[in-house]
Image: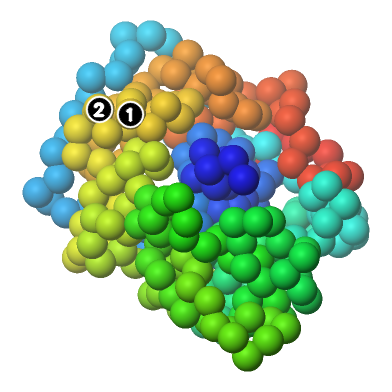
Amino acid sequence: MAFRGFFSLAASAALVLTACPSKPGETATEPQTDTTAPTTGTTASPMMATTTTGSSSEPTTGGSQAKRCESRCDSDRECQIGGEDLGFRCIDGLCLFPACTSDAQCLADLSGWQTPCTTQAECKVEEACVAVADGGRCALTPGTFACADFGLVELTLPLVDSEREVTVCGQASATCEAGVCQSPCTGDEACPPQLGHPFCDAPSGQCVCQIDQDCLDSGLPGYVQCVDGRCGCAADSDCAGGKNVDTCYQGICGCSSDAACTAMVFDAAPLSCQ
């Protein structure tokens, strides 16, 4: 497994950070679905530092409303990734992750357990096929790293094809609230620094940044400054290197036109800048 890819999963789905995995079509560099560091609150703590040392002297052409590259579809089949059904459906013409129906589903989704399985052979060597939600899912297991490295905790679950239990890495606080997966942080250990927001603001349940360097250390495109606890861009050039983004909209990287939507997310869902 490419561990850095696990952290950026939310940039494409996966991942994110506000609820169930966001739609991969929203490929602004803000990790939307980062399954490893959800942010369910709405207001950062007033104690958080606000700094703006990004390249604000450079031009920013975006307005107040960010536009995203969205994956357009006509059928569920078009929303497969690499020929696999990872749970995304064609909803209102867009490839989206459906509303959650159970806490177990959110445990799997927010923990990054995306691959369905019926036997251990269907999972990677660093994963275990555990019984959860609607069947089996390949779940990350601690080995040469700790679950905390991914903002997760150790959980004990039964294997899908045996009564034996195994330790895996997951989001213990994941719940389904009104169709939306939630998992507020309760401590800094739930906020991986690789995502640019290494500190937990307990009152809001958000993972936040405190200084610009927190954002810069992530190495993520568009993460150059920390404003009110959130990492963001200061100029269009800050979005360079990000997928399907070329414009800074008040701190968020987005697209300026369909021409910026060049990296397909789903197998057969064309992108459109909306």
Residue name at image x 48 percent, y 73 percent: 167
- Residue that sits furthest to the top in the current view: 58
Residue drawn 57% across the image and 26% down it: 242
Q: Identify the amino acid type marked 1.
A: Asp
Disc 1 packing (10 Å; few <14; some 14–19; many ≥20):
some
Does residue 266 appear left or right of residue 249 in this picture?
A: right
Q: Give the residue displayed 59% in from the left and 56% down from the top.
A: 126
Query: Which residue position holds label 2?
Result: 213
> At which x and y percent is residue 103?
52, 82
Q: Which residue type does callout 2 highlight?
A: Gln
Q: Would you identify the image quadrant in which residue 120 lies?
A: bottom right
The correct choice, above or below, for 158 with respect to 70 in the image is below
Q: Can residue 273 be seen in this view?
A: yes
SS at mark 2 in the image: helix
Q: For the residues labelled 2 and 1, say whether their Cβ atoms are less than 8 Å apart.
A: yes
| Left or right side of 109 for 135 | right
Read off the residue under disc 1.
217
Image quadrant where one finds the N terminus: top right
Q: Which of 190 and 124 is in front in this view?
A: 124
Residue found 24% across the figure and 28% down from its top: 212
